[in-house]
Amino acid sequence: MYPGVWPAESGLLDGDRLLPLDRLTFPDRTPLLAVGSNACPGQLRHKMAEFGLTSPVPMVRTRVTGIDVGVSAHVSILGYVSASPVHAPGVTRELFVIWLDAEQLALVDATEPNFDRVRLPEPSARVELDDGGTLSGVFAYVNRHGVLHNGDGVPRSHPGQHALISELLTASTELRRMFGLTPEEFCVRARADARLCARGTQLFAKEKMVTRSGLEHLRVR
């Protein structure tokens, strides 16, 4: 289930193998903060293979302050509610930065139709490496529909797919009518049904569940 399994350590994704890294930065590539399935080697491998790309992808574990993993305000046709970064002063998370070459970056951009790639603000968002160094010029994908909140207008953290969908279904009678009573039924109904997913996305806004991520103004594409 989304977002898939993340690595325990930094590594170089080369086909089906996650190899040791000899360094943590790659100046000839673009650093991209992954808050969802882009941090899953299996998902990355699938994306690259689908378009015939075979070049390796460095995946570097980092400690990120000022950014939390929020909840995208849209229902994906893959059958889940995805993650999106949100501005969160004082919050620190361990997240992966993937380093993409120009061809890989263009491909991943194309697979994120509901997101805008933005450059994270410095110094309010700090990305620290295991060796104590910090990264600048890090990008992330921010959901263009906004993010969900808990009722107080503050972006909610993503608790994991099963827990999240359970909470959303419990809170909304109309969402249960559209997607069923359980996370499993939600995923089955949503998967590959673009019209239903669009209605679910509209319902989030209609029921006033949506707020801003705090990163929208940084849009670069």
Image (tube, grey):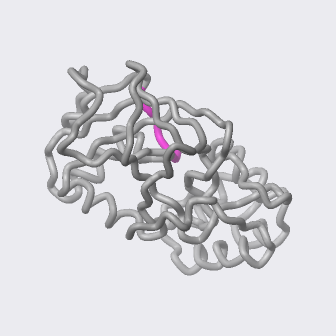
Which quadrant would residue 66 be assigned to in this image?
top right
Residue that appears at 80% across and 61% down:
153
Residue that appears at 21% across and 21% down:
22
Q: Which residues are magenta?
A: 1-7
Which quadrant would residue 56 be assigned to in this image?
top left
Residue furthest to the front in view is: 123
Residue that appears at 83% across and 65% down:
172
Secondary structure mainly formed by the magenta segment:
loop
Q: Is residue 96 left or right of residue 156?
A: left
Which quadrant would residue 111 be assigned to in this image?
bottom left
Note whether 200 is above or below 147 in the view shown: below
Q: Along the line of sight, which residue is nearer the eye, 50 or 221? A: 221
Q: Is residue 25 left or right of residue 1?
A: left
The location of residue 193, given as percent across then percent down, is 53, 74
Q: Is residue 115 left or right of residue 19?
A: right
Residue that appears at 71% across and 65% down:
211
The location of residue 194, given as percent across then percent down, is 51, 76
In the rendered image, the quadrant that contains the C terminus is bottom left
Q: Is residue 65 left or right of residue 56?
A: right
Queried whether the magenta region covers residue 178, the answer comes back as no
Number of labelled discs? 0
Q: Along the line of sight, which residue is nearer the eye, 41 or 109? A: 109
Q: Along the line of sight, which residue is nearer the eye, 209 or 131? A: 131
The location of residue 52, given as percent across then percent down, is 15, 55
The location of residue 49, given as percent across then percent down, is 21, 51
